[in-house]
Amino acid sequence: MARVATSVAVVAVVALAAALTGCASAASTLNDATGQGLAAVQTAALVVEQELDDRTFPTTATATLGDARRELVAASTAASETDVTASSDAELREAVLEALDEGLRAVNDARDAMAGLGSLEATLPSLEQAAEQLEDLEAQASTAAQTAAASTAGAGAEPSAGAEVGRA
């Protein structure tokens, strides 16, 4: 009998977790992916600066750039798998994917430069530009996520269409 109760409790917890996960808005998921990508690009830029100033070991810089790449790929996967129900969320998803891709290219360039393929110093502006773009999109996604959460919390409110996405 105790086994059955434990099994039922486990199933209930898993069902609750699945239900709570399903409640996240597209904008909220895109905000999370953007934040993850931004942190990865900023970390990559920091390690490039440290490497250029001889304040880190090349193996540490290479490993950190590899971690940043994995985080960007994970963020891109999360964003690309986000289902949307409004055109503004679809536009936001596209902008987030483009910015994450730009960040991934910059990180790959830095990692290649660590292997002797190109100039490490030349990768810094690309990393900084990718970080700026992701910061802007994070602000837009955060606003859209807050709007979606507010409309979901309101009784009888219509689902939010999200925030408008500006293109640079």
Image (cartoon, helix red, strand yellow):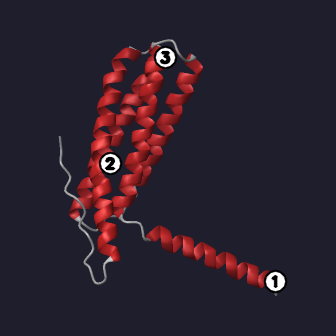
| Disc on res. 145 | none
Read off the residue under disc 2: 138
Please tell me whether mark 3 sits on a helix, a strand or a loop.
helix
Read off the residue under disc 3: 51
Please tell me whether mark 2 sits on a helix, a strand or a loop.
helix
In this picture, residue 167 sits left or right of residue 17: left
Instruction: Inspect this view and state whether residue 76 appears.
Output: no
CB contact under 8 Å: marks 2 and 1: no
Structural distance between the alpha carbons of marks 2 and 1: 47 Å
Q: Residue at x 35, y 41 (%)?
A: 100
Structural distance between the alpha carbons of marks 1 and 3: 58 Å
Q: Residue at x 55, y 18 (%)?
A: 56
Q: Amino acid at mark 2?
A: Glu
User: Where is residue 120 drawn, in percent x and y?
Assistant: 41, 16
Count neighbours of disc 1 (C-alpha within 10 A) and say few if under 14, some if 14 to 19, many if 20 or more: few
Task: Decide: is 154 above or below 103.
Answer: below
Q: Residue at x 45, y 29 (%)?
A: 44
Read off the residue under disc 1: 2
